Image (cartoon, rainbow, N blue to C red):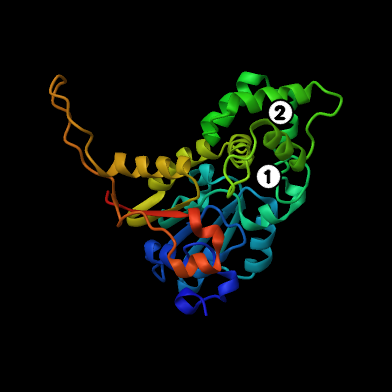
Amino acid sequence: MSAGGDLPRAHVPVLYAQTLAGLNVRGDGRYLDGTFGRGGHARGVLERLGPAGRLLLMDKDPEAIAVAQREFAGDARVAVRQGSFAGLADWSETDAGLDGVLFDLGVSSPQIDQPQRGFSFMQDGPLDMRMDPATGMPVAQWLAQADEREIADVLWAYGEEKQSRRIARAIVARAASPSPLATTAELADLVAATIGRRDPHKHPATRTFQALRIFINRELDDLNTGLVAAVSRLHIGGRLAVISFHSLEDRAVKRFIAELAKAPPGNRRLPEPTAFVPTLRAVGDAITADADELAHNPRARSAVLRVAEKLQ
C-alpha cells in the first residue's frame, strides 16, 4: 500500500503524503496542480474532494495534458489547461480563488525516461529539452548560434558549473566544426572529455544539462512569476506547496516565502518603515524524503517541499 493507502506504491510521486498533508485538502475546496506530470499528486487531491470540490490541472507538456484529458474528461470537478503555471492568474477558472496550489518543479520521470525528449544523457536522443516541443528553441539550435560568453553565463547561473567557461569554449568550437552537437550523448561526451570525471557518483555533464534545461524552458522566470500569481489567487487560509529538486529552485521558494512572512531587517539610517503585515506564514520547516521513501524512490533524494499559508 502507498502512503495514506490511496495509491499503489509504484505510482506514488515524490513526497506524496507530505504534500497532501501540506495542502490540507477540504472536500469543497478549489485546488490547482500547476505541474500535472502524470497526475500522482492530482489523483490524491481528487480522492479527497467531494462533489462540490474543484481541481484545476496545468502543465507545459502536451503529453502530460493528453493524459490529464484522457483520465479526467468524465469528471465534472476537473478542468485542464496546457500552459505554464506562470499564467495561472490568466485562466478564468482561477478567478473564484483557490484553496491550494501545488508546483512540483523540474523535469518529470516520463520526460527523463523518453530519449526522444532529450532531457537525459542516460539514453541517447535529440538534444531538445523543451517541455513544450511546439514552442521555443531546441537546445541544439541554441548552442549552435550562441556565443561563448552566453553559454558560459547560462552554465554558471543555472547550473553553478565551475568549469562553465571551459565547457562553453568546447561547445563553440564544436559548433564551428562540420558536425555540431545534435544529440544528448554527444553533449555529455564533450563535457566529460573537457572537464573529466571529478565525482565518481555524478556524471560530469549533470550541471550542464540542468542549466540548459532550466534556461531553455525559462523555469526560474516562470517560478518567480508563478509564485506571485499563486498567492494572488489563494483564499485566506489557502496553502501553497512547492517541491524543488535543486538549490536554485529551493532558494527562490524559500526567499519568496520569507519576504512575505517576515519583516525585513531595519536600518536606523533610513526613515521608520511602514509597519510590516505578513501575507504568508511558513507551515513548518523544509520537508525531505525519509529513509523508507528513498529506499523505494532514489529520485526523491534531492526533493525539498516547502509549504506556506496565506494570511491576508
Q: Which mark is residue 277?
A: none
Q: How many neighbours does mark 2 have within 10 angstroms: few (below 14), some (14-19), or many (20 or more)? A: many
Amino acid under disc 2:
Leu
Q: Residue at x 69, y 65 (%)?
A: 70
Quarter of the rendering containing residue 192: top right
Quarter of the rendering containing residue 10: bottom right
Q: Position of residue 142 (x, y in %)?
A: 71, 29
Amino acid under disc 1:
Asp
Q: Nearer the viewer, residue 284 or 197?
A: 197
Q: Which residue is mark 2?
A: 143
Q: Is residue 87 visible?
A: yes
Q: Position of residue 252 (x, y in %)?
A: 42, 40
Secondary structure under the numbered disc 1 in the rendered image? loop
Q: Which residue is mark 1?
A: 132
Mark 1 near mark 2, Cβ–Cβ under 8 Å?
no
Q: Residue at x 50, y 50 (%)?
A: 245
Secondary structure under the numbered disc 2 in the rendered image? helix
Q: Vertical placement of 149 versus 124: above or below?
A: above
Give the CA separation, mark 1 to mark 2: 18 Å
Residue pushed farthest right? 178
Q: Residue at x 35, y 57 (%)?
A: 238
Q: Nearer the viewer, residue 158 or 58?
A: 158
Q: Position of residue 199 (x, y in %)?
A: 57, 44
